[in-house]
Amino acid sequence: NTSLQSVREGKSLKMVNLESLVDFKVKLPKSLPKGFILSGGRVKTFKTTKELHIHYSDGLSGISLFENSSGRMYTRKRTPLRSVDIRGKKGNFYKVGPVRILEWQDDGLTLALVGELEEEEFVKIARSIE
């Protein structure tokens, strides 16, 4: 399901089909940690590239999923802490303060999970994204 009830595009809040806002097939997680639900999202445009940001929350913690089709890596100037397998693709973990980032490329998309969860939770979420 690629519908989202609270997507911000500019300043308006409306129900939309995510794929109508971007130029790629949106990938969403099939599995989230217990208590996490979709809390919103938005589309940003950088030059000619649209980036999707979807946010999930359990009321205390948040997880952000970023997607873009430009091939641009979010962490291009950072050295990864370690690599993991995401359904046959190489994913890289980074840490910025208390925040963890798991970034990988799949089917022409760059995807990044960002939040304060343990690495194992990030890997579970990433492997469930289709």
Image (spheres, rainbow, N blue to C red):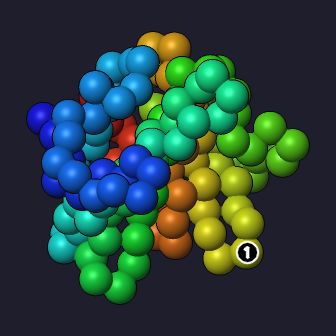
Dot 1 alpha-carbon crowd within 10 angstroms: few under 14, some 14 to 19, many 20 or more: few
| Secondary element at tag 1 | loop
Query: Horizontal placement of 45 versus 29: left or right?
Result: right
- Residue at left offset 28%, top offset 25%: 20
- Locate residue 95 relative to residue 88 in the image: left or right: right
- Asked whether residue 33 appears in the rendered view, the answer is no
Q: Is residue 53 above or below residue 64?
A: above
Please determine whether, in this image, residue 114 is positioned above or below residue 29: below
Say whether residue 52 is left or right of residue 129.
right
> Which residue shows up at 73% across the image and 66% down it?
96
Tell which of 41 and 124 is nearer to you.
Answer: 41
Pointer 1: what residue?
97
At horizontal 28% and vertical 83% (from top left) the residue drawn is 59
Does residue 108 sit above or below 129 in this rendering?
above
Is residue 130 visible in the rendered image? The answer is: yes
The image quadrant of residue 63 is: bottom left
In which quadrant is the N terminus drawn? top left
Q: Where's the C terminus, which quadrant?
A: top left
